Image (cartoon, coloured by chain):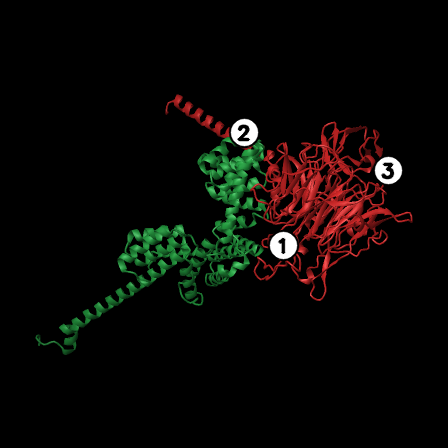
Amino acid sequence: MRSRKPPSQAAPASLTAASPSSRNWKRLLALVVVLVVCGLAWVAWSVLRPDPLQPAREALDRRDFQTAMTFLSASLNENPDDTEANLLAAQTARRAGDFAVAFERLKISERKSGRTEPLTQEYSLIKVQQGDAAEADAQFVRHIDRPELAETPLVMEAYLEGRLRVLAPRSDSEMNAQKAEVAGVAKLHRAVDLWLRLRTGKADTVQGLVWRGRIQVFENEHTKGIASLREALELDPNHFEARWHLAMAVAQDSPPEAARHLETLLAREPESYLIRFGLARTYRMLGRTQDSQRLLTELRAARPNDPSVLLELANLALDAGKVEEATPLVTRMLELAPDALPVILTASRYHQLANHPDEAERYRKRAESMLADQQKKLESSPTQP
Amino acid sequence: MSSPSGRIWLFALVIAMACGAAGYWFTRDAQQAKQTAANPPKGELTPTGPAWFRDVTESCGVRMICRNGEEADQFTILESLGGGVALLDFDGDGRLDIFLIGGGYFDGADKTTLKGSPCKLYRNLGGMKFEDATASFELVGPWWYTHGVAVADYDRDGFPDLLVTGYGRIALFHNELNGKGGRKFVEVGEKLGPRDDSWSTSAGWADLDGDGFPDLYVCHYVDWSFDKNNPVCTSAVPGNPRDVCPPQRFKPLVHALFHNDEGKGFRNISAEHGFKAEGCGLGVVLADVNNDGRPDIYVGNDATNNFLYLNRNKQPGELKLEEFGLRAGVAVDDTSRYNGSMGVDVGDYDGSGRPAIWVTNFQGELHALYHNLGRETFDHRSRPAGVAAIGMSRVGFGTGFVDVDNDGWEDLVVANGHVLRHPAASTQKQRPVLLQNVESDGRRFFRDIGTRGGPFFDTAAIGRGVAIGDLDNDGRPDIVINHTNSPTVVLHNECDSGNPWLGIKLVGKGNRDVVGSTVTLEGERRRLTRFVKGGGGYLSASDPRILFGLGSAGRVKRVTVRWSWGETQSWEGLEPGASWELREGVPAAARTPPTP
């Protein structure tokens, strides 16, 4: 009796003692589960992990190219072979106008992965933005009716920057309506319209308005141009370019307003030669001779041999009838820039006031001859590139 | 430093640094404050207070529109010039009357026949009321396309005569008795000349050769004509296929100088004096600019160098002119470029006793203030004088020195308006400018005080001729402005500065012409100098009398006249608040009866 167990207490063989095949199934199942979990985790990480280029992209949305380059450089330090980062860095450098860095980045990418299509496009956009008219027109034609392409806004941007660089290198550049067709102003307007349609973020809108304003000023639509620039500045009162171009656009109509804008810019960039010099000249225009003198004296301390600064200082002295004070300035600027028309003109004025009529006449005649040469060149030159 | 003496030194150092910093900030602020005080008033400064001018056009009875015919859409350069104004006392009642240029239009099937719009003469009834006296004074036309007017007593009969310029002819109207106890104007050009079939604009009179009779300078513009030279020009502004052509598309014409043969005839002597076709003449003023007692001629030319003809006569009876513009520094601007010059005037803006030359210019150029340095030398001082602060978007035409507030410093008025229908970076209608002559940092400075001028100075129009004069003899200069295609405006000066004034009317011996004379008023504290001018402004003629605002000059000690071609004569005891007639060779001044 003792040797016999009741059958009800005996576990079935399959349960109480797993067979080898059953164990394998379990292991396999576990492995699959683990793999699936890992896979899901990997997918989740891939999707949710922080994009190392994201901060750069956010900076680019704000058109803060400097900050974007800082993030991109950090990213490339960690992963120098990151093709995407290299391309974005090249693009960012180009958009900021730093063509040397853009080239450098593209070369690195090219060495690693050959001349891919995006790289070719970026090389082309560098040319466009540098002012290559043929390249610009080709890109324009390829993209102006293709708003769905991701690259189209950047093409429009490079096109606008490049064409304006050539057509309106100075803020006071103006064209003649007869030359409008040659200058392709209609295309500039189409490009900026498309840009504003595709890029609706605040920074890009402001930039679009600045371009529009510059184009309008260039095509002699000053009232519209000034309105566009004012609209840009209302959206972003800290926009340097908008304020600079507005200052230049209103300078003829309202020098006091131009001075106000330049003063605002100077407060932001107190060391800027361009702003300080522009403001000094505007102050002279307003008859604010002491303010002008102060700025020019500071500039002269930093750049003692700058003929432009010496010229303005000499004219200020002559404005006040201080011929003796002007003497060393005129002498020095004639040494530094003996063939510059403004220098010759000021020399003539100086000698006139110094009661040297013959010398004044000599310089005046020279200036007249230079002006005549300039006029001849202007008349014989083609209207626009 | 942890020792007590070290702590004391540290404390002392901190105190010294704090004192130094405080001192720096204090002196810096003081320096800045000083600089601010020394600098000219900033452009934004807008003086407030009652308006100095009231537009009385409606109430005074002057109804006039100078036409240019632009509705024919010919886009000719002829349309760009507009018309002038003359202030003259034609009936000798002591009140300034107003003559207004009518302009013209294009007639005929193809709208290429030039016709004149009627000019008008308004008699001053007193109390700032005027009546249209054109018909009663027989100035009924037929008119041609007219532009300018100049006034002088060419035959020395004691009454001012009128010269009217325009396209294709000029006309001299003699002021004479009408046989009914009144006066009338009779055209005498056929009989006496001057004959001129060119395109004449501004004109001015002065006795250039010292024979007592005023000679006549007539500016000529360019060689435009429908028949021979009528180019088509496109607009610089997109969307406007056509606009008026610039003067550079044409050739300048030789200006005319007519010698007055003792009131019995006129001879064009421009060839004898070597005049060349080198200036598109628009403005002329005759005055003694080099202080030699003889009238000189300054001409504002459009898109060509301005002229300065210095009168080099050694004795009366001869005429020798020397063109001295470039050498004197008044032909071009401060970048050695010619300007598009329109209105011209001379005045002593800085109390130096020397006449500066003032020129209104085209868009993109500064109006020119040529400071007189003496020794026949001028310097372009528009920037330091604050004139440049008004910007360069306007096209200046009629202008003149005018002491609006009687402070003894000559202010400036400018009527503006573009010549193009679709100007780039500007507008066709433009606001006028009123520049107040203020002291700043020991120098004279012009400040835009349009806000103080009244609503007129905030209204855009196509301004052209301007004439300045005391219409109601209240000692305050009023202004009349002729516009293109909109009503002439009469501005009554209502400036309540309370500054005293003194009016002077000069009468030469035997009514000889006195342009080129210089009048100096010596007050207790200041010396004021004014110049007797022929022409001046743009297409216009202002009050020939001289009005001294006395400001802080104090008691009038003496008034001295240096008669052109004559002696120097002084008068004492002239009371302010009245007008005085000073006759050459007569020691006593005559008080002019008040005629408001």
* Between marks 3 and 2 in the image, the one whose residue lies nearer the viewer: 2
What tint does the image give chain B?
red
* Circles 1 and 2 on the same chain: no
**Where residue B263 sits: x, y (%)?**
80, 43
Q: Residue at x 35, y 51 (%)?
A: A100
What is the quadrant of residue B334 in the picture? top right
Q: Is residue A25 above or below residue B316?
A: below
Which chain does the green colour mark? A
Residue denoted by label 2: A324
Residue type at mark 3 is Pro
Secondary element under disc 3, as helix, strand or loop, is: loop
Place residue B298 in its image quadrant: top right
Q: Label 3 marks which chain's residue?
A: B
State the residue position of label 1: B427
- Residue in the foreground of this view, choosing between B25 and B564: B564
* Tag in front: 1 or 2: 2
Q: How many marks?
A: 3
In percent of width and height, residue B238 lies at 56, 60
Q: Chain of mark 2?
A: A
Q: Which residue in the rendered view is the most extreme toward the top? A: B5
Above/below status of B74 relative to B347: below
Q: Label 3 neighbourhood size at 10 Å, few (<14), some (14-19), many (20+)?
A: few
Tell me how far mark 1 sits from mark 3, CA to CA: 46 Å
Q: What is the spatial separation of the Cα atoms under label 1 and label 2, in whole angstroms? A: 43 Å
Circle 3 sits on which residue? B593
For the view shown, which residue lies furthest in the front direction? B272
Which corner quadrant holds the C terminus of chain B? Answer: top right
- B335 vs B431, nearest the viewer: B335
In this rendering, does residue A154 appear at all? no
CB atoms of marks 1 and 3 within 8 Å: no
Query: Foreground residue, B452 or B548?
Result: B548
